[in-house]
Amino acid sequence: MARYTGPVCRLCRREDMKLFLKGDRCYTDKCGYERRAYAPGQHGQARRRKQSDYGEQLREKQKVKRMYGLAERQFRGYYYKALRGRGVTGENLLVMLERRLDNVVYRLGFASDHAEARQLVRHGHFRINGKKVNIPSYLVRVKDIIEVKEKSRTITRVVDSLGSIERRGVPQWLELEKEAFKGTVKSFPAREDFTLPIREQLIVELYSK
């Protein structure tokens, strides 16, 4: 599956908000969005035009896709699963995205960003309930225990990321045992657990057309 491999700070500037795609760098004065908080491209510094309803819906969808590092086909698949589920479609979509293993690894602080988390998962550095899982899209369940393999606990990237987890914080629906390199899913995420501004209803409206 093709993935974006260009400069990720450009994506934050395109969506006009910090998406935290660059790990710890996003928390420093070296953050590309903080230094150039305008759209990329030749006319990026020109005044942004008022968007149409469709434009707002498209930008919201692109923003959430980029937060989780997903391609269009994969993201659309999550939407249709959310549509078939019980409850509010938009919230169902966000909950599924948060339950992805690569996202949980990032939220627990074992990786500094989603891309790094996905790579670590694919390389088999994690176990769930004692079993090796190397599928980034695996959806965790309540009471699942995610832990770093014992041989992988000396990896510099994992150690450094855990060392700065206090700055990011761990969501309330997860519990981290830092010294044991282990985390537990206490519950599914609630809508109030999403700290970044997301208007999921716009995504639902876009796909409903």
Image (cartoon, helix red, strand yellow):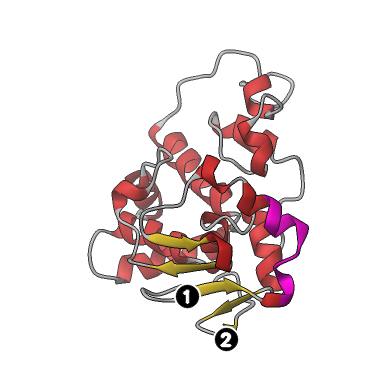
Residue shown at the point (55%, 65%) measured from the top left: 74
Mark 1 neighbour class, 10 Å CA radius: few under 14, some 14 to 19, many 20 or more: many
Across and down, in percent, residue 53 comes to: 38, 34
Is label 1 in a helix, a strand or a loop? strand
Reply yes or no: does residue 185 show up in magenta: no
Q: From which residue to which does the magenta span run? A: 151-160
Quadrant in which the N terminus is drawn: bottom right
Residue shown at the point (52%, 58%) measured from the top left: 108
Across and down, in percent, residue 2 comes to: 72, 61
- Any part of residue 94 in sight: yes
Q: Which residue, as the protein is rendered here, is positioned at the far left?
A: 87
Which residue is denoted by mark 1 in the rendering?
Answer: 145
Q: Most prominent secondary structure in the magenta stretch? A: helix
Task: Specify the quadrant of the image occupied by residue 116.
Answer: bottom right
- Mark sitting earlier along the chain (1/2): 2
- Any part of residue 1 in sight: no
**In-image side of 8 versus 185 (left or right):** right
Label 1 and label 2: CA atoms lie apart by 10 Å
Which residue is denoted by mark 2 in the rendering?
Answer: 131
Residue shown at the point (52%, 72%) measured from the top left: 146
- Label 2 amino acid? Lys
Across and down, in percent, residue 208 comes to: 35, 55
Residue in the foreground of this view, choosing between 134 and 17: 134
Residue shown at the point (73%, 56%) measured from the top left: 157
